Amino acid sequence: MAMRFIDARQVAQACDYPGLVAHLRAAHRQPPAAVERILMQQRSGAGADDAVLVWPAWQPGQHLGVKVVTMFPGNRTVPAVQGVYLLFGGNDGSPQAVIDGTELTYWKTAADSALGADLLARPDARKLLMVGAGALAPHLIRAYQAIRPRLRQVRVWNRSADKARAVAGAVNGTPAAMASDLEAAVRQADIVCCATGSHAPLVHGDWLRPGTHLDLIGGFTPAMREADDAAVRRARIFVDSRWFTVDHVGDLTQPIASGAITRDAVRGDLFDLCGGRVAGRTTDDEITLFKSGGGAHLDLMTAQYIARAVG
């Protein structure tokens, strides 16, 4: 098989969120791939942590692949997240595709969170709050629209009001607007989706009303955090995978270290939920929390979907 080069435009044209979410759901019912995680960080001149992630995954007999992604929060003229994905045959190791890793990451991350929300958020959820207005935010909103097509309100909060207004103005199919007061917006939302680079909690547990689903996406190091101790104590907690979350992300490592919660507070991951080994939401009044850590297995699942969709 000749190696293909799949750029961002091809990915965007060939993929859709209903299809990718369904693919991830089915893939989580299969034996997981072997994975590794390599993270390197350097302090930048602007005081932020620049990072490079190398995430390989291998499903013998199917595919193996590796994503190399850079995260430079201080970027102004190019995206903060950039990368490339290499997909190989699982039997003979032959290179099959080079995929735009930035676009793959957007689709993977949004579909990952949408799958978690589909399993955990109330079926009658109508109001979505998007916390953060980076390049990922429009993807997340579209993914949530795919799994909750009856959404009737989208609000976007960001430290920069102009960015929040721009993201809200680009939403199609659902009335959307900028939120100026984060606490008030959280108190009104059925689903709170956070995709920021924050190192201090933005969402407070006391603001969450019964039945809310809280989705935490942005933090990928132990120093990063988007929700406080009260939020994790009040919630029924799930993760996309235990490998890339429990010991690696501040939204879990920090409250575990302080004693606010124990490791046992994490009820399950997407493999458990999709495989029917644990129950997700059990009552309408429960607060559910889904912590996304990403991971090489998700990148491989998404690369397989993209390669098939592009044809």
Image (spheres, rainbow, N blue to C red):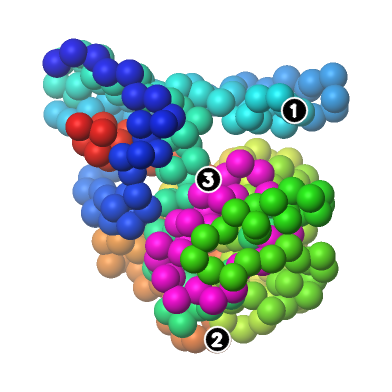
Residue 107 occupies quadrant = top left
Depth check, mark 1 against mark 2: the one in front is 1
> Is the C-beta separation of discs 2 and 3 under 8 Å?
no
Which percent across, then down, holds residue 35?
A: 38, 32
Q: CA distance from mark 3 to mark 1?
A: 25 Å
Magenta stretch holds residue 154: yes
For label 1, count other residues whose C-alpha is less than 10 Å away and answer few (under 14), some (14-19) or many (20+). few
Residue for badge 1: 76
Q: Residue at x 59, y 70 (%)?
A: 175
* Mark 1: secondary structure: loop
**What is the distance, in whole Å, between disc 2 and disc 3 at their CAs?**
26 Å
**Whole-percent x, y for residue 166 in the image:** 69, 51
Q: Along the polypeptide, which appears first: circle 1 or circle 2?
A: 1
Question: Circle 3 — which element?
Answer: loop
Between tags 3 and 1, which lies in front? 1
Q: Amino acid at mark 1?
A: Arg
Q: Label 2: which residue? A: 285
Q: Are marks 1 and 2 in contact (CB under 8 Å)?
A: no
Residue located beneath label 3 in the image: 293
Q: Quadrant of the N terminus?
A: top left
Based on the picture, tell me whether residue 55 belongs to the magenta stretch.
no
Say whether disc 3 or disc 1 marks the residue closer to the N-terminus: 1
Residue drawn at (35%, 39%), measured in percent from left and top? 13
Region of the chain picked out in magenta, as a range? 133-157
Percent of width and height locating residue 90? 19, 24
Whether 36 is drawn above or below 187: the answer is above
What is the crowding at mark 3: few (fewer than 14 residues within 10 Å), some, or many (at least 20)? Answer: many
Nearer to me, 146 or 239 = 146
Q: Eyeballing the image, is 57 above or below 133?
A: above
Going by the image, does 92 lie left or right of 143?
Answer: left
Residue drawn at (47%, 34%) of the image: 103
